[in-house]
Image: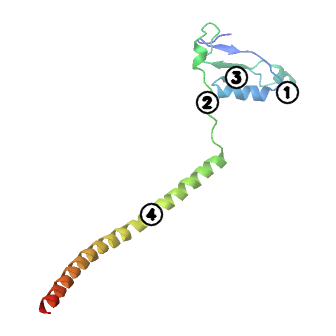
Amino acid sequence: QPRRGRDSVSTVPQEWTSFARMLNLYGFKKMSRTPRLGSAASRAAAAQVFEHPHFSRDSAELHLVARRTKKKASAADDAAAARAAEIEAMRTAEIESHRAPVVELERRLSKLEVENASLRARLRGYEGDVDSEA
């Protein structure tokens, strides 16, 4: 029966657990209609009702909104992602630790290149004086 503009899905497939998981992936929610008391057989035989706000027998276009949700990452996936982020952070920190010495060495190199050019000019001047005396 529809509730608040929603319709329900009523079916009993062979692989119930798998089917219920698929319904959950598409946003269907199980309505609590199964009896809590009684034997396991009577609880298993009771109808289970799933509802979705965009599933309606009367509106053909509303079902297009019902999309499969992404699978949640497992704990192993989360741990691997955290480790990868940690390694990347360590690499970044190592690169940053080398940046200041590199900048200092580049500054010193530039200063030495200027000094070298000055010394070469002085040397050419001395060589010119020696040639003019000879």
- Name which residue type carries label 1: Ala
Badge 3 or badge 1: first in the primary sequence: 3
Instruction: Give the spatial CA distance, label 2 vs label 4.
Output: 39 Å
Q: Nearer the viewer, mark 1 or mark 2?
A: 2
For this rendering, which residue is in front, 104 or 84? 104
For this rendering, which residue is in front, 52 or 103? 103
Instruction: Give the spatial CA distance, label 3 vs label 1.
Output: 16 Å
Measured from the top left, where is residue 122 in percent x and y? 18, 83
Instruction: Give the spatial CA distance, label 1 vs label 4.
Output: 63 Å
Q: Mark 4 packing: few (<14 Cα in 10 Å), some, or many (20+)?
A: few
Where is mark 3, residue-wise? 32
- Name which residue type carries label 4: Ile
Where is mark 2, residue-wise? 69
Residue at the image point whose x is 77% and y is 22% from the top: 35
For this rendering, which residue is in front, 22 or 38? 22
Q: Quadrant of residue 101?
A: bottom left
Measured from the top left, where is residue 132 in percent x and y? 12, 88
Is 116 displayed left or right of 37 in the figure? Answer: left
Is 95 displayed left or right of 40 in the figure? Answer: left
